[in-house]
Image (tube, grey):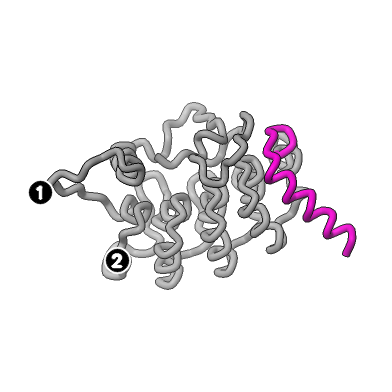
Amino acid sequence: MIPVLNTEINGDCETDSENNSIKSVLKWKWGSRKSAFLPYKPVSTVLTNLQRGNTEAKSGEEIKFNFHARAAQGEITANQISSEGCDTVDIYGYTSLHWAAFYGQSYTVTMLLGYGALVDKLGPEGETALLFAAAGGHYDTIKLLLEHGADVNHSDILGNTALTYAAAGNHPHSCHNLLIKGADLTISNENDDTPYSLAIRKKCYAAQSVIENHLLAMLSS
């Protein structure tokens, strides 16, 4: 299930979190509104179980996914994109590009962008595909989105940028890819947290190290 990104970021990082589930790194505050992806929970559970090898495929049983869930799984086709449309949103306002970016489906992201998907199309609370990719630590997807013109310093309605999420999730490679493309370290969210202050407070040592090395390189240049 893809969580809403617009949340207060808290909780401590884990030592090796580049490949961890974002839920194990960030504590999401749902507020008064339900998860935007609650209707897809059964599908996402199936996807997660299949990826982890917890579910055996049953002979003759077919699991049907909608277009957006297929994008998350990385299994949409050119014909489906042409039929559904690149920027078609689900009932909560999220596109197939948002789904693919959150799950790090770089090939699907490439397909969607090739068919004209808007790289910076906003979700209902200011989310972009880049923010979803950064939150998940998908540095290859981040690089791809940036190469297609994604706004590296876009912030959601709470002021969190892609670098904010990458730092808070302790994703060093993601932080690096964002920083070399001009991510602004000084942007603070509504809680006055910057990516660096979050990395320190949350004990995200890998992300903190990348940011510090970047700062040193800037000072010495």
Q: Position of residue 26 (x, y in %)?
A: 56, 34
Q: Which mark is residue 60?
A: 1
Give left or right: position of 52 versus 127: left
Element marked by disc 1: loop
Residue assigned mark 2: 77
Q: Position of residue 129 (x, y in %)?
A: 51, 55
- Is 6 above or below relative to 33? below
Q: Nearer the viewer, mark 1 or mark 2?
A: 1
Residue drawn at the location 40% of the way across and 71% of the way down: 115
Q: Amino acid at mark 2?
A: Thr
Residue drawn at the location 82% of the way across and 53% of the way down: 215
Magenta span has 50?
no
Q: Nearer the viewer, residue 56 or 40?
A: 56
Q: Is residue 126 visible?
A: no
Magenta span has 201?
yes
Q: Residues within 10 Å of mark 2 (few under 14, many from 20)?
A: some
Q: Is residue 213 visible?
A: yes
Q: Nearer the viewer, residue 90 or 97?
A: 97
Q: Amino acid at mark 1?
A: Gly
Q: Which residues are magenta?
A: 199-221
Q: Quadrant of the C terminus?
A: bottom right
Q: Position of residue 78 (x, y in %)?
A: 31, 70
Residue drawn at the location 68% of the way across and 63% of the way down: 181
Give left or right: position of 57 versus 91: left
Give left or right: position of 74 versus 162: left
Q: Which mark is residue 111?
A: none
- Is 49 above or below relative to 181? above
| Main SS, magenta residues | helix
Do labels 1 and 2 touch, CB within 8 Å? Answer: no
Q: Position of residue 210 (x, y in %)?
A: 72, 51
